[in-house]
Image (cartoon, rainbow, N blue to C red):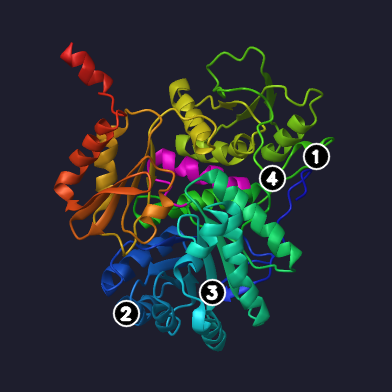
Amino acid sequence: MDLTQFSRRPSCEVSFGPVTIGGAHPVAVQSMTNTDTNDTEACVAQIGRIAAAGGRIVRLTAQGRREAENLQNIVRRVREEGWDVALVADIHFLPEAAAVAAQYVDKVRINPGNYRTEHGELEALVEQCRERGVALRIGVNHGSLAKRVFDEWGDTPQGMVVSAMEFLRVCQQKGFDQVVVSMKSSNTRVMVAAYRLLVEAMAAEGMRFPIHLGVTEAGNGLEGRIKSAVGIGALLADGIGDTIRVSLTEAPEHEIPVARLLADHFARRPGKFAVRHPERYSPVEFRRRSGVAVPVVHDEPMDGFRVIEAVSGNPTAELRAAILNLEQPDESVVVKRRYDDASLETVAVKAAADLGVLLLDGLADGVWIDAPQHAAADIREVELMILQAARARFSHTEYIACPSCGRTLYDIERTLARIKARTSHLKNLKIGVMGCIVNGPGEMADADYGYVGAGPGRISLYRGREVVARNIPQEEALDRLIALIKEYGEWEEPENKVKNER
């Protein structure tokens, strides 16, 4: 990568349906339905809302043959309605479902960790896609690596790259270049490292496949937007990424404006910034540059910190260069940037995308957002959320919550709101809220506790990776989760309740 200026990574073009990504095309934005794929009209209506919001790529889950077959009806109805979108089938456990879906959709996404490769199933799918002009996404998930990969590499960025490259080599050997690749994780540090390592690995083997970016299970509200912006923004700042999805536990059409804001924010990054000490920076190996134990925000003491403010149209490169040019390589640094946007959400997304990577990479020791149109208390919360999303400082409960899809077994949006209402006062805990078991246990591997859909009206509770209660009624699940947290001594009563009892 060129540390001195912004340039997009060269990639080949991939066309599917009415959409082409890669090459010189702008970064495309997309979303995924959360309706039942067997419910044609509900899916078509939601696809229409996503398209109306500006999303031209829409993914639908096809967890079984029945759902895969119904994609034919959905595609027909979407075309009848006149929506100019590319439709993508999301496949997990069943290669047969991929073979069915490839008859109807524009692109098929498979997960190497959940997809069998024996007996030439991948090769057969590649040939089927080639014959019909269907694109393929190799979508690696941090939490669902194949057992043989996990046993050798663990759930590491390196293991994710090994998983992806095995499948990409098959595509390359078959001369099939209509391939997109992704490396998703709910942990932004893992996600960014995996993508950067993948780019290196592909370049070493002459691969130029386009890249899809996303942070899985980012959650909702401002927190979910900031977490996505930190991870996605870090890579867009490197020139990596041809299409993006912001995964929110909200209505899918809410994802599109955030993704569009990020894509537009990085459409042009002017300026060139000399870097005297590039050896101090390693994009694929996390190293804290200074000895600061607790990074700071704007209203905390900054004695001993150097404040560096960006003024150019490429604040990430400008600030990174300034830090790498310091005479004292371990000097404590706070990075600062002014934002005049009237929307707090816009300020939060832009600041997270511009500044988060400097914390994520261990270069900065604090963040200062100068946003005169907003209350200092609101900006402080945004700064703390950026620090947490960058894994630099934890100050509040983190929710690893999936955006839901047709596999989701309960109303995850309302459930997440109820869980937040009861637990958001806790400090330094991570709680996973997952719709089903497909990615649930793996993707919430970082979580201290997990709430996972096990069947209609049924929930399984986890502590770390261990199931501690299976298939309990959902109406009992939240109280049981709180009881579990109390059992392990990690519960605190809300401050207002303590005051009332006094």
Q: Earlier in the sequence, mark 2 or mark 1?
A: 2
Task: Look at the magenta stretch and give its main secondary structure.
Answer: helix
Q: Earlier in the sequence, mark 3 or mark 4?
A: 3
Above/below status of 423 relative to 259: above
Q: Quadrant of the C terminus?
A: top left
Label 1 SS: helix
Labels 2 and 1 touching (C-beta < 8 A): no
In the displayed structure image, the side of residue 451 where residue 356 appears, left or right:
right
Question: Which residues are the magenta region?
Answer: 216-234
Residue 231 magenta-highlighted: yes
Mark 2 or mark 1, whichever is nearer to me: 1
Q: Which residue is mark 1?
A: 278
Regarding residue 411, the answer to whether it shows in the image is: yes
Distance CA(mark 4)–CA(mark 2): 44 Å
Q: Which residue is mark 3?
A: 136
Distance CA(mark 2)–CA(mark 3): 19 Å
Label 3 SS: strand
Q: Amino acid at mark 4?
A: Pro
Give the image location of residue 166, x and y in percent: 61, 70
- Residue at 61%, 36% (x, y): give it: 355
In the displayed structure image, the side of residue 491 where residue 107 appears, left or right:
right
Q: Which residue is mark 2?
A: 70
Mark 2 or mark 3, whichever is nearer to me: 3
Label 2 SS: helix
Labels 3 and 4 touching (C-beta < 8 A): no
Mark 4 neighbour density, 10 Å: few (under 14) some (14–19) many (20 or more): some
Q: Which residue is mark 4?
A: 283
Viewer-nearest residue: 345 or 291: 291
